[in-house]
Amino acid sequence: MDTILGIRGPTFVMLAADATQARSIVVMKQDENKIHKISNNLMIATVGDSGDAVQFTEFISKNIALYKMRNGYDLSPKCAAHFTRKNLADYLRSSSPYQVNMLVAGFDPKDSLPELHYIDYLANAKSVKYGGQGYGGMFCASIFDRYYYDKITQAEAYEVLKKCVAEIHKRLIINLPKFNVAVVDDQGVHNLEPITGKNLEQLQ
């Protein structure tokens, strides 16, 4: 029932993730942050089994931090996505595969280019302009297709994500009242105002 969304602009990548943590029919908490800052120019949004999502994200985060300590510089977002995909593929062939879907977002300061990578639990990976994971993501493909264009601004991307969340609230039987939003650009990773029912009222 988790949902994460991502959209890539010319100078940034923006991610949104619901803040609901549930198990079966029980809501455990509604302030879970599913967008994880991995480095100054990299973040990962994860959905799936809660234990797998936390453990695998921690594993990736610590190994990328170790790489920086050993080499003196960060992995590029593209390299981080390949590293993540390879580890997911290796665990897929083990006795304890991770049931995790994710969006890897980053900004490469060397090339001044944003990167957004879609990775699923079968270790399929693809660089995308926009995408979603989870039940809510199925309702957003047409919205992304309608409103996305190559030179989209951060403000416009935020409005597109608000449209997506509004559609999720309208169509999905599962209650996902709050979506955390974060953006990565040449200034690093920073959080934006969460999308809730209150700031969606103007779209109704």
Image (spheres, rainbow, N blue to C red):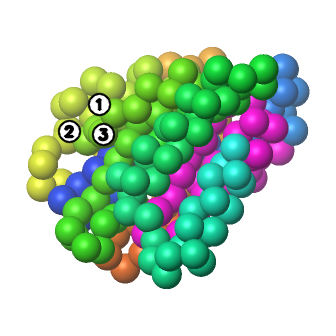
Which region of the structure is painted magenta?
Answer: 29-55
Q: Nearer the viewer, residue 9 or 66?
A: 66
Q: Amino acid at mark 3?
A: Ser
Q: Residue 186 vs residue 2: left or right? A: left
Q: Secondary structure at mark 3?
A: strand
Mark 1 is surrounded, within 10 Å at the Cα level, by few (under 14), some (14 to 19) or many (20 or more) other residues, namely: some
Whether residue 20 can be seen here: no
User: The N terminus lies in which quarter of the figure?
Assistant: top right
Residue 161 image offset from top left, x and y in percent: 39, 45
Observer-side mark, 3 or 2, equals 3
**Residue under numbered circle 1:** 143
Q: Amino acid at mark 2?
A: Tyr
Q: Which residue is mark 3?
A: 127
Q: Secondary structure at mark 1?
A: helix
Q: Residue at x 44, y 64 (%)?
A: 75
Q: Which mark is residue 106?
A: none
Give above or below for 184 relative to 69.
above
Badge 2: residue crowd in 10 Å (few <14, some 14–19, many ≥20): few
Q: Position of residue 109 (x, y in %)?
A: 29, 74
Residue identifier under label 2: 147
Marks 3/2: CA distance?
Answer: 19 Å
Q: Is residue 8 above or below residue 40?
A: above
Relative to 135, say whether 3 is above or below: below
Quadrant in which residue 155 is drawn: bottom left
* Quarter of the view holding residue 64: bottom right
Regarding residue 145, the answer to whether it shows in the image is yes
